[in-house]
């Protein structure tokens, strides 16, 4: 009798398990591959007078750069549009005004003809000034357009000798909406050059490298050119509003914006029932900022009620601070899509000498996925685990067995059963 | 006699169930999850480049050592997939080439972020380390909390999905900025034998605005947990013990008496007969 009952219970359990398995679909999520577009790279080479110094493996800086360029041109991946721009290559005089305009495109950005590019590089002679700022501005114009990545590689041995702070110029270029990265390489740099170059790199999310040897220069430039073929989603530029009512309505995707110090920007997202909103925001510090900083991301209803929030703060050297929230909207048949306001704030601050315009780069990633299966119990399917559970079940088994056993014995001895 | 035998069988059954349970649990505890092969990278060779931000983070599989040549001051990003029930440890190593002269001590740090770019705390491990100017390398580690399949929307419990690793120098002498370094990163994980298994399931936190990140064998189903074994084994144990106890308490069932007519007696030989 007891066995039959237990068997029935067991089969019921099995049925339940099978049902549970069937009811829970295997969740899958696919990130769409990124379509490939032609990446554009321009190498910006300093050909100023100081490049004739012979201190890179016994060679002059210029000849080291030339050899490195030869190697890089040979190994440039197919499908990369590569151009070369020089600065300080043509004007040897002392007039600052003229010298600071001395930047020229040596080889246009486009499909690479290696021989032509190499022979153009071979003609270079260390000559003039170091107008980094104007060169960057011109280079940005050279590689504008197209869907691929945009990358400038600046190779120089000295700081800007003209008026404009190239760091500000770089930040300005990045703020114009071109998805542009500037990597800088300093040839045996002094402290001032190093600061300026690392500042330029920081302004656009690029990297700064100190170069002491020719081989190092070659490897690094190759690496940077190869990096341009990395496919990543290009963010869509948007502009958040000061309040939710004026905020732009965004869909799933990656967005970029700018936000000045201690500013709050609002965006709106439509979340249908049965969907989960996932928002991640990254605020980068593209300039010198004070040691303590933070970022805030809030999901708020149209009426101003806070649904969910995340904030992150930090201290010390960083490239970015990020926060993320999830908001699952329960499934219901007749409810309309809900408008969720997203507030992105930051608590960066900067010394008074630092320009606050343009604002800090903000990257907002939005995803809408199926809402989660809500648990009925904290534990996995309400199942138990561990020696306490086993002990309890064992005791229950023994007690139940003893009770039914005694009952059976009583029935036997009392003659109710033959 | 029969009771003893039955009890013995019950005990044997229980022992087997227990052994199966603990055995499987132990196996779950000790074996590392199978190391997946490259998915998004498209090739089996371990990556030799690192990304420079969340968007460009290099995809690397668990158990694969990713390397990158970089400059001191770079922010190096990788991303990997972590599934439910894994205890993930991220190891990072920075090696300094002997050719470059460094001017002072430097501080290095590894940070781990989840798929929503929320910074994840490390339960233990040397997350930040300062090394002297003449050190050859620095090792960093971060042991994450157990990955869960569900959590409250308001908590930042680690959910299955993408995890980003950021490796960078926090502090160094200005003169050492931009010097070449070699970086390596590896994420490994071990199982939890269901001790952290929670109900509910959230779609893996992988953004659609990036590369496709998933474990090589796909995301594990959310219906399995060693808790099935524990609970099922416990049920079997209870049944076996109940049977044994039942038999013990009831005592032996007396077989029905041999079918002889009542009052039948064997005829005796008459005394003195045949004398």
Image (cartoon, grey):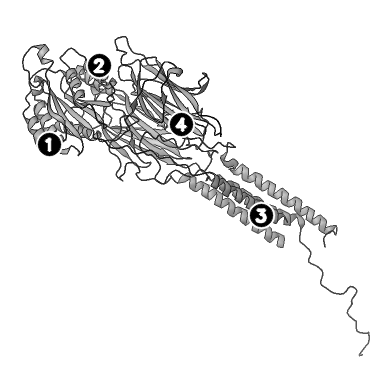
- Left or right placement of residue A166 versus residue A67 in this view: right
Q: Chain of mark 1?
A: A
Q: Nearer the viewer, residue A216 or B126?
A: A216
Asked if labels 1 and 4 share a chain, the reply is: no
Q: Nearer the viewer, residue A131 or A328?
A: A328
- Give percent across and percent down for residue A127: 7, 20
Q: CA distance from mark 2 to mark 1?
A: 34 Å
Question: Disc number at residue A333?
Answer: none
Q: Chain of mark 2?
A: A
Q: Give the secondary structure at mark 4.
A: loop
Of tags 1 and 4, which is closer to the observer?
A: 1
- Give percent across and percent down for residue A83: 16, 30
What residue sits right under mark 4 in the picture? B123
- Left or right placement of residue A254 versus residue A300 in this view: left
| Earlier sequence position, callout 3 versus callout 2 | 3
Number of residues whose C-alpha sits closer than 10 Å to that of mark 2, classed few (under 14), some (14–19) or many (20 or more) = some
CB under 8 Å between callouts 3 and 2? no
What residue sits right under mark 1 in the picture? A113
Q: CA distance from mark 3 to mark 1?
A: 80 Å
Single out the residue that lies furthest toward the bottom: B274
Q: Give the secondary structure at mark 2.
A: helix
């Amino acid at each position: 009798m007891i066995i039959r009952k237990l068997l029935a219970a067991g089969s019921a359990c099995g049925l339940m398990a099978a049902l549970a398995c069937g009811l829970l679909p295997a969740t899958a999520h696919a990130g769409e591959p990124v379509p490939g577009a032609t990446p554009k790279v321009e190498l910006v080479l300093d050909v100023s007078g100081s490049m004739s110094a012979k201190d890179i493996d016994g060679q002059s800086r210029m000849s080291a750069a030339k050899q490195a360029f030869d190697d890089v041109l040979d190994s440039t991946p197919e499908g990369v549009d590569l151009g070369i721009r020089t600065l300080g290559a043509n004007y040897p005089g002392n007039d600052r005004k003229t010298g600071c305009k001395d930047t020229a495109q040596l080889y246009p950005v486009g499909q690479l003809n290696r021989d032509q590019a190499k022979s153009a590089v071979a003609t270079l002679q260390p000559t003039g000034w170091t107008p980094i700022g104007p060169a960057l501005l011109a280079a940005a114009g050279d590689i504008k357009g197209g869907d691929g990545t945009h990358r400038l590689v600046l190779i120089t041995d000295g700081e800007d000798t003209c008026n404009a702070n190239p760091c500000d110029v770089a930040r300005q270029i990045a703020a114009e909406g071109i998805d542009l990265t500037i990597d800088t390489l300093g040839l045996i740099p002094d402290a001032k050059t190093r600061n300026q170059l690392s500042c330029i790199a920081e302004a656009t999310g690029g990297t700064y490298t100190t170069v002491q040897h020719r081989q190092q220069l070659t490897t690094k430039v190759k690496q940077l050119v190869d990096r341009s073929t990395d496919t990543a989603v290009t963010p869509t530029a948007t502009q958040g509003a000061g309040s939710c009512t004026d905020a732009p309505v965004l869909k799933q995707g990656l967005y970029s914006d700018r936000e000045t110090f201690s500013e709050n920007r609002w965006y709106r997202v439509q979340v249908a029932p049965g969907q989960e909103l996932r928002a991640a925001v990254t605020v980068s510090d593209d300039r010198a900022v004070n040691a303590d900083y933070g970022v805030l991301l809030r999901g708020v209803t149209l009426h101003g009620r806070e649904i969910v929030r995340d904030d992150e703060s930090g201290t010390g050297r960083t490239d970015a601070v990020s926060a993320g929230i999830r908001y699952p909207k329960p499934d219901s048949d007749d409810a309309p899509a809900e408008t969720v306001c997203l507030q992105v704030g930051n608590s960066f601050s900067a010394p008074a000498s630092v320009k606050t315009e343009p604002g800090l780069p903000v990257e907002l990633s939005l995803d809408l996925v199926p809402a989660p299966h809500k648990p009925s119990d904290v534990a996995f399917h309400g199942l138990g685990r561990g020696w306490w559970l086993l002990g309890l079940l064992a005791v229950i088994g023994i007690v139940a067995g003893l009770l039914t056993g005694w009952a059976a014995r009583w029935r036997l001895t009392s003659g109710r059963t033959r | 006699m029969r009771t003893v035998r039955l009890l013995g069988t019950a005990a044997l059954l229980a022992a087997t169930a227990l052994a199966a349970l603990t055995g499987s649990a132990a196996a779950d505890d000790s074996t590392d999850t199978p190391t997946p092969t490259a998915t998004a990278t498209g090739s089996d060779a371990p990556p030799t480049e690192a990304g420079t931000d969340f968007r460009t983070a290099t995809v690397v599989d668990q158990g694969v050592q990713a390397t990158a040549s970089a400059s001191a001051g770079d922010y190096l990003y990788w991303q990997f997939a972590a599934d439910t029930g894994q205890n993930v440890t991220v190891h990072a190593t920075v090696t300094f080439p002997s050719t470059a002269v460094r001017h002072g001590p430097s501080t290095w740090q590894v940070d781990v972020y989840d798929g929503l770019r929320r910074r994840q705390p490390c339960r233990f491990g040397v997350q930040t380390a300062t090394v002297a100017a003449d050190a050859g390398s620095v090792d960093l580690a971060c042991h994450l909390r157990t990955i869960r399949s569900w959590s409250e929307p308001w908590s930042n419990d680690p959910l299955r999905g993408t995890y980003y690793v950021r490796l960078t120098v926090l502090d160094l002498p200005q003169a050492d900025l931009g010097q070449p370094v070699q970086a390596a990163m590896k994420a490994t994980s071990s199982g939890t034998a269901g001790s952290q298994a929670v109900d509910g399931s959230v779609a893996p936190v992988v953004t659609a605005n990036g590369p496709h990140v998933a474990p090589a064998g796909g995301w594990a189903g959310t219906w399995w947990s060693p808790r099935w074994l524990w609970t099922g084994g416990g049920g079997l144990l209870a049944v076996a013990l109940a049977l044994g106890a039942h038999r013990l308490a009831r005592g032996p069932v007396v077989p029905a008496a041999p079918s002889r007519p009542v009052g039948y007696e064997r005829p005796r030989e008459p005394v003195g007969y045949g004398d």
